[in-house]
Image (tube, rainbow, N blue to C red):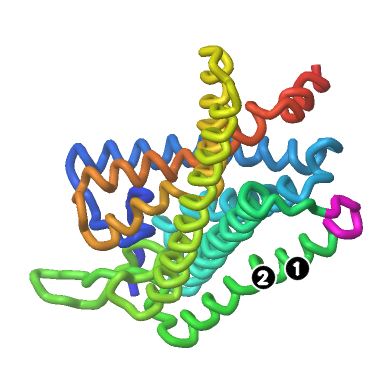
Amino acid sequence: TCCCNHLTSFAVLVGGDEVTGEDGVALLWITWIGLSLSIACLVLTAVVLATSPALKSKLHNLILLNLVVALGVAQLLFFFITEPKSTSSCTVVSGLLLYFLLAFFFWMNVEANNLYVTFVRHDVWDNSPGTIACKIRRYMLCAWGLPLLFVVGGAMTDLDGLITTADAMVGGAVVGSTISYCWVDKDGTAKWFFFVPMLVSLTFNCVITVIVFRQVQHQLAIRLQRGIHRLSTRASEAAQGIRIMIKVASVTGIGWLVAVLVLFGVGGTAMQYLFTVLNAFQGCFIFVVHVVQKEDGRAFFASLR
């Protein structure tokens, strides 16, 4: 198998067709600028969450820290999928990318479950260090362990399908194959070890998000019915509800729902643009919502001055 070097957009992860011409160049720039900024923001987010005493003691932030690590490593690995050195190294890159992307989805599920417990069930958590440590260990066992099963399953079922190849042509005749990029072949069997858990994960998150959104809307309606007539107060309540919804959407991967449309070829190039913008910059969204807009996050940066 020969190797070739070229660049591709983020939409290739969900089976998007290779886009050429001006759209291809635009998607390429969006992908690489977005991922560069996203990784920088994820690093900052991880540093803040791991070193701020006020943040690292909370279960939500420990979940978010693991999610940020999984997403950051996955986005970093994307830079290497179009530079295969050999079949073996390309397979390793693809396997690692598959693992960390699935870990990211599973940590989104953990976060979605945590949001459900917080906003819907209103459970009072035991916030003692011992209890939090026990919970996060169980979460880590599931969210870091389950992806490994899918990667091993994909490798055992269709090892060659972990990389995407194309026919190598000489004089109009096929003389072999060349590696297109280090990611699951959309015509192979291994792809299902990514797409199936991705779709299940997104379905779960979508259901939880709708439930949480409805609960937030319900709570907002109750507050407004309790004699709150001042416009400024009503606007404040509405703004708080919107902030909660944005917070939920940023960590439950709502932008990845567009992946389903890309996967089934709905919307063509327009959907690839939407998917790329929403997900290549996801680290930036997480940093803004969970660090910049939080008082503890701002206090951390203020303490560095």
Does residue 199 lie above or below 116 as drawn?
below
Rendered residue at 34%/69% (across/down):
164
The image quadrant of residue 177 is bottom left
Residue 38 in view: no
Locate residue 220, reporting x and y percent.
55, 33
Is residue 170 toward the left or the right of residue 223 in the image?
Answer: left
Residue at the farthest left position: 172
Which residue is denoted by mark 2 in the rendering? Answer: 142
Q: Which residues are magenta?
A: 126-132
Does residue 173 lie above or below 51 as drawn?
below
Rendered residue at 58%/63% (across/down):
106
Does residue 226 lie above or below 126 as drawn?
above
Rendered residue at 49%/46% (across/down):
214
| On-image quarter of the N terminus | bottom left
In contact (CB < 8 Å): disc 2 and disc 1:
yes
Cα gap from disc 2 to disc 1, whole angstroms: 6 Å
The amino acid at mark 1 is: Arg
Q: Nearer the viewer, residue 267 or 96?
A: 267
Which residue is denoted by mark 1 in the rendering? Answer: 138
Is residue 128 located in the magenta-colored stretch of the structure? Answer: yes
Locate residue 133, reporting x and y percent.
84, 59
Locate residue 305, reporting x and y percent.
80, 16
